[in-house]
Amino acid sequence: MPVIGEVPFPMRALLAGARRKEFLLVDLTEELVRAESPSDNKAAVDACVALAAAHAKALGGRVKLHRQKNFGDLLEARLGPKSRTGAAGRTMLLGHLDTVWPLGTLKTMPCRVADGRLWGPGALDMKAGVAMALTAIEILIEAGALNREIVLLLNSDEEVGSPVSRPVTERLAAECVRVYVLEPAQGLAYKTARKGVGNWRIGVIGVAAHAGVDFEKGANAIRELARVIEKVSGWTDLKRGVTVNVGVAGGGSKSNVIPAAAWAEVDSRIVRKADGPRLERRFAALKPDDKSCKLAVSGGINRPPMERTRSTVRLYHEARALAADLGFVLHEASTGGASDGNFTSALGVPTLDGMGAVGEGAHAGHESVLLEHLAPRTALLAGLLAQCARTS
Ligand SMILES: [Zn+2]
């Protein structure tokens, strides 16, 4: 049971608060979903950010927009009393407002409530999570229990690898003692570990020649690429949690031409931080077997892994205990997918992820949020934020 001051704060009261607000929570999620916000459309993302900013302001949030040129602005909202003791007691709520869905998706995937679910592009990943965070804060305010500073950061570029928000995320996370990430749950579980991600592009330059007339003068870039693909694929080590996937490849022009160029794009995942530099070294050291070919390799680790650290497990156990007060069992899970939680965790800030909505079909046509879990999960989030008052 979280303690506010010295008075135990019953989770059931937070659950009742969340149930009272469920209707508004669904409304807010729908409002955010209807503001379509593909990562590559600044104006659209900005409009969605403006909705969330207005909501945070209405809750008394101290709102700051980190302006961006090529992406939507980043929304930083600070709520609760200003922390006077450095990071102590400050919690970061981390999420994103961009989606993978292009403008106009609502026509084929309308935002609607049906069959116990809220459907629509970005509903699960992760506009419901953003609405849950704002609602959890509202519940705390009404209960007079918002007595530590919360830093809510909503970015606009997560779905394309967080190129501009990463430094802001890292700077603000370093000012906090914990990070709660509002990405969707893994099934019903919170996420305590995520794989890290690396991306590489391998280009091969060969020598073009007529396949019939000048065969021996050519250097076949596709053949060389095939050898390289075999080599890098062999670096997969499932036991260590290392995977190397060549996902896209191309090259050549006509079947009677020895190809002068070929290329491949590689996605690699790692469980341990130490495997990042190892892989980077291996890619950098790639050499062509056919000395007439040249390799051009670019890329590297984009997101370090979120390792299952002791401090993250401690956050999970706190959550599990409060979930039990609410009458449900909260499991933990790991995933191969990465989020901005990877960045904060790699900084050493205890990070718990998957604290947003429960549902199915992120990045897929059946993307939907299960309504029955909204109120309990929002109450749990509120309880954890209240508990922070005691533990820090
Ligand atoms: Zn997401």
Image: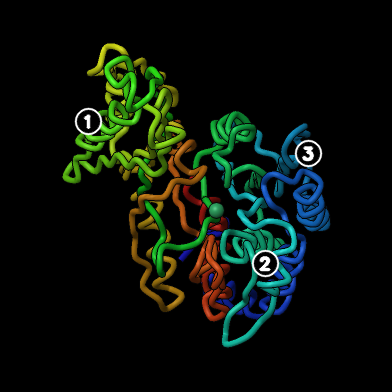
Mark 2, other Cα within 10 Å: few <14 / some 14–19 / many ≥20: many
Q: Earlier in the sequence, mark 3 or mark 2?
A: 3
Residue at 32%, 45% (x, y): give it: 308
Kindly state the secondary structure of the residue where label 1 is placed.
Answer: helix
- Labels 2, 1: front one: 1
Q: Amino acid at mark 1?
A: Lys
Q: Nearer the viewer, mark 3 or mark 2?
A: 3
Q: Earlier in the sequence, mark 3 or mark 1?
A: 3
Side of 342 where 222 appears, left or right: left
Q: Which residue is mark 2?
A: 139
Q: Is residue 304 visible?
A: no
* Location of mark 3 (residue): 65
Residue assigned mark 1: 231
| Residue type at the position of mark 2 | Ile
Q: Which picture quadrant has residue 144?
A: bottom right
How crowded is the residue under tag 3: few (<14 C-alpha within 10 Å), some, or many (20+)?
Answer: some
Q: Position of residue 358 (x, y in %)?
A: 50, 69
Residue 305 placement (x, y as % from top left) = 37, 38
Crowding around mark 1 (Cα neighbors within 10 Å: few <14, some 14 to 19, many 20+) is: few
Percent across and percent down for residue 287 are 27, 16
